[in-house]
Amino acid sequence: MRPALALVAALALFGAAAPGAYAHGAFIGSDPEPGARVQTSPGRIVLRFTEPLNERLSDAELVSAADGKPVAARVVKAGSRLALLPRRALERGAYRVTWRSVSTEDGHPLEGTFGFGVRVAAAGGEGATEAGPLARGGWVRAPARFALHVALLLFAGTLLAGAFLGSRWLTPGEGAETRAVRGRAGALLAELGLLAAAVAAAVALIDACTAAGRVSAAALGDYLLSGTAGLARIGLVVLTGLAALCARRRPRVAALLGAGALGCLVASGHANSAESRTVALLADAAHLLGGAIWLGGAAAIGLVWGPSLRRSEGARRVVAREVLPPFSRLALVAFSVVVVAGSINAIVELGRVSDLWRTTYGAVLLAKILLVAAIGAIAYVHAVRLRPQLGAGDARVERRHWSLLRAESLLALGVVGAAGLLAVFPLPPRQLDAATAQRSPLPACDPCPLPAPGPGVLAVAGQGGSRVVAATVARRTVTLAGEIRLLDFRGRPAGGPVRVNGLPARRIAPGAYRYVVDAAPELRVTTAERGRAHETVLPAGVQPGGEAAARALLARAEATMRGLRSVEEKETVTSGPGTRAVTTYRLQAPDRLAYTTDLGVETREIGPRQYRRRRGEPWTVAPLPGDVPFTTRSFFRWTPYARSIALLRPSRGAGGRRLAEVAFADTATPVWVRLTIDLATARVLRERLVARARFVDHRFLRFNGPVRIEPPPDAIDASGP
């Protein structure tokens, strides 16, 4: 028992160092960005992922959103990137990219889509990534995983229990009852080993065909021979088969091979792509080893002795006095390992405790936890409370004891089923959050990082054609001085000339100009693009020393907006002349959102479900893309961008309302925001946001008005198999 107890203690210590995020082969961004409008045909569409990809099994396709026909493009694959190179320039229109990735680290395939537009609104918006366990053949993979876990845990658990308790732990002694079942035990062990090897081979075949999207010998080779995940699946089949051959004559060797097979099962799963891989693999391996001894050993007792227990009092006596006591001591340690290692796995897999009930993955994990707790309670009752009373001749106690023992085995099937289902999820919640966090909705300006404005310097930006016109403003005694930056739709420096309040600005670097003009309440920046002049009006009047007041007002406004019962939002987005999209949003606390686009697309998000339709078509319902439900409290998020902030001069609105305007920016992203705030209520009335290729105007109205966002009746399930 001492090595097992030491393992429990070691796992508890490793829990403090559980990895904060998974790497996983998830999609993290593209160029053009998902949902972007571009003014010219991109020469290439680059997709970025978090892990190296299996180049033979990962692919992407460019499709015209107008007719659904593929667009001729060459696919280039390298490392963690896929690139689509269109054969000819893309015409004006909306396009959609569909992609499939297979990680070389854990072998899990993912699929997703996103859209972009060339001089028109994007198709498919931000896109979606598959996150459910039953997508793309999951109805086959989940039962196959369940069968693999049942067979392997039974087989390996019986061998490992024998390694701790002796090869005849299941059939101790030489009594008549023991001799009668010994042959059954040997046959069962051999059959379980061969069954586990066969199921492992079937699972490897199913996984390979799922990842490749086809059934072929070439696909099998591409999957199994191109990464640790595939090699681990081969090792699982080989080690299980060898353990089956050694089970009778070399039980200790067979136990080592069985433990190795469980290790291969771990290496072929999510733990192999962990950021702190050693900790994750150790915790997952310990979880499986403990579960195999505890659940597999208990199930083996039931299978070997079950037929005799129903008809023979002598068999019940042997099991109660000679089989169960030593196994129970080992099972207690194994159960402790399962609980500690399972807790570490939960920390690794879940980003928040609320993910247990807010995500599908968490719900399955919660069901598994509850089943384990129920088994633990049952084991306590029959092992601690009832078993000492078996010798008293109380028939009722005896019947209850054996009934609970059978119930424990049945519940164990539920635990194994939940484990099999969790194994086929493409992304646990923390992995999904990590991948989402890496997707910057406003990507960094590369290769032109902008300097951060100094203390007391205002940073503002506006639209000049399709370009970003960003300015820093420092007020001197009678002048305004600063720099103007011009960025094209890719965030790269753009050419001039530039005039500020009628005076020419001096070019100091590509896309950068310096100016000094007479003091004025605003800057009028004139630029030219393709022979056409554009004037951008930017505020320049700042309240001296107003940074602290601006931050306090921003925090108050953010809290006020998050606390609303309901609000309506009008959004206008453009990326330059000739492009414009209008969307109306309605928000209802705490978790309901509805919006309608000017193209007639209606969407409602309620909890974990999304309802969509085009004008004149029926509603469809499916799980939310990314499995991250909407909440009104997280919708209004401005403070992370307030690296520099200023309070502009106050003004008066309709009805004499006192208004304040807060301007803030994060030039590293880069993004510039201006909020108009009602000082009496701290409600945001307008937001103007500027980023590369994106100029957004939000107007908020109908605060706390009557809003009811309900699931549409008769919506068609579009979640797919």
Image (cartoon, rainbow, N blue to C red):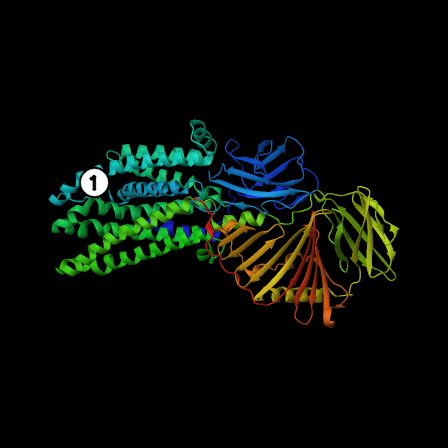
Q: Amino acid at mark 1?
A: Ala
Instruction: Measuring from the top left, give residue 130's x and y in whole percent.
Output: 49, 45
Is residue 209 positioned above or below 335 on the image? above
Q: Is residue 293 left or right of residue 623?
A: left
**Helix or strand or loop: what does disc 1 sit on?**
helix
Q: Residues within 10 Å of mark 1 (few under 14, many from 20)?
A: many
Q: Compared with residue 269, is residue 473 higher up or lower down, i.e. above or below?
A: below
Q: Residue farthest to the top?
A: 218
- Return the x and y of residue 519 as percentages of the image width and height: 86, 60
Q: Nearer the viewer, residue 421 or 300?
A: 421
Q: Nearer the viewer, residue 108 or 247?
A: 108
Q: Nearer the viewer, residue 431 or 180?
A: 431
Residue 556: where, in percent of width, then height?
Answer: 64, 67
Which residue lies at the image location 69% right of the left edge and 66% below the top edge?
677
Give the labeled residue for mark 1: 185
- Answer left or right for 442 relative to 270: right
Viewer-side residue, 156 vs 337: 156
User: Residue at 72% of width from left, 66% of height from top?
Assistant: 660
Q: Quadrant of the C terminus?
A: top left
